[in-house]
Image: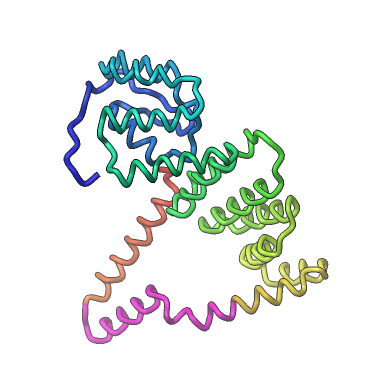
Amino acid sequence: MSNVILCLGTMATTPYFVTEACVHLFSIEELCYYIYNNAFLLDDDFVNERLAEWVENDLQLKKVADTIRTVIDKPGALSNLVRILNNEIGYYTEDEWSTLIEDIKNNSKMSLDTRKKIRADGLLNSGRYVKAMEEYDGILCDMTRDDKQLTAGIYHNLGVCAAKLFLFDKAAVYFEKAYDTYANAESYQEMLWALKLSLQPTKYLDYLSEHKESYEDSLEVERKLEILRMTWGEQPSHKYLRELSMLKSEGGSYYDGLERMTDEVKEQYRSSVNGIW
C-alpha cells in the first residue's frame, strides 16, 4: 500500500460492527484493512446480506454491494470478496492481494478456536497481556470442540501473560492447568518457576519435598536460573544502569537518565495492562 489510496463511497454514519473482533468499520477502506489484518479470524460466513446492505446503504456503493451479493452462500465467498474489493477498490498491492488469498486458503483448514488463539497469541507477542488474557478466556468459554492440546496451549499462554504482569501465583495455577490438561515438561517447569517466584523459599522447598516427581524439573529450573544470573550483566538495562552510575561519579546527568528509564518502564507496563489494541 505504498501508493496514494483515493477513498471511495461515503463515510458511514452507522458503522459496520464486526462481532468477531468487536470493532466498528466506517468506510470501505477500513473494511479492506480489517480483512487484510484479520483474515485468520474470518470464514465464508463473514460475507452476508448484512454486509452487502451496509456497503449499499451506508457507503453508497451499490455496484460493489450487488457484486458481493453474487458470492453470498457460495464456496470461497471470502476469497471472492477479497477479489471484488481488489477489483473495485484497488486497496491492495499485487503482493498483498496474493498473500491475502493464500492466507485465506490456509486458514480455511483451521478451526475457529485455533484461529482465535492465533489472534490472542499476537496480542501476547505484542505485549498486550491483559487484552490477550481476555481473548484466551473468551476462547475457553466458547470452545466449539474438545481439543485438549489447544486448551492446554491456551492455559499455558494465560500463565505467560500472568507472569509478564508479575502475577506469579496466578501464573502457577494456569501452568498447572495446562499440564493437567495435556502433560508437557515446559508447562510443568514454568509452573515451578512461578511457584519459586511467588512462594517464600521455605514454602517452595516444602512443595518440592511433597512432590518428589518435581526433582528433575526443579534442577532444570535452577540451571536456567543460574544462566540468567550469569548473563544478567549483558542485558541492555543492566548496561544502561552501569553507564548511569559512571555519570553519577562524574557529576553527569544521572538523575535525568534514571528518570527517563523509569518513565520508559512505566509506559511499557501501562501498554501491557490497558488492553488497547
Q: Is residue 251 magenta?
A: yes
Residue drawn at x 30%, y 26% is: 26
Main SS category, magenta section: helix
Q: Which quarter of the picture shows residue 114?
A: top right
Which quadrant is home to the C terminus? top left
Is 205 on the left or on the right of 273, as rendered? right
**Could you tell me residue 186's position as x and y percent?**
66, 63
Establish if 135 lies above or below 50: below
Q: Which quarter of the picture shows residue 147?
A: top right
Residue drawn at x 33%, y 37% is: 33
Q: Which quarter of the picture shows residue 261?
A: bottom left
Can the viewer see residue 260? yes
Is 252 on the left or on the right of 67, as rendered? left
Q: Is residue 240 magenta?
A: yes
Residue drawn at x 65%, y 77% is: 222
Is 60 on the left or on the right of 106, as rendered? left
Q: Nearer the viewer, residue 219 or 50?
A: 50
Q: How is the image coloured?
A: rainbow
Establish if 88 lies above or below 200: above
Q: Nearer the viewer, residue 117 or 211?
A: 117
Q: Nearer the viewer, residue 86 or 30?
A: 86
Can the viewer see residue 199? no
**Could you tell me residue 106's position as x and y percent?**
51, 43
**Could you tell me residue 252's position as x and y percent?**
21, 80
Query: What segment carries the magenta color?
Result: 225-252
**Could you tell me residue 228's position as x and y percent?**
53, 77
Which quadrant is home to the N terminus? top left
Residue drawn at x 22%, y 83% is: 251
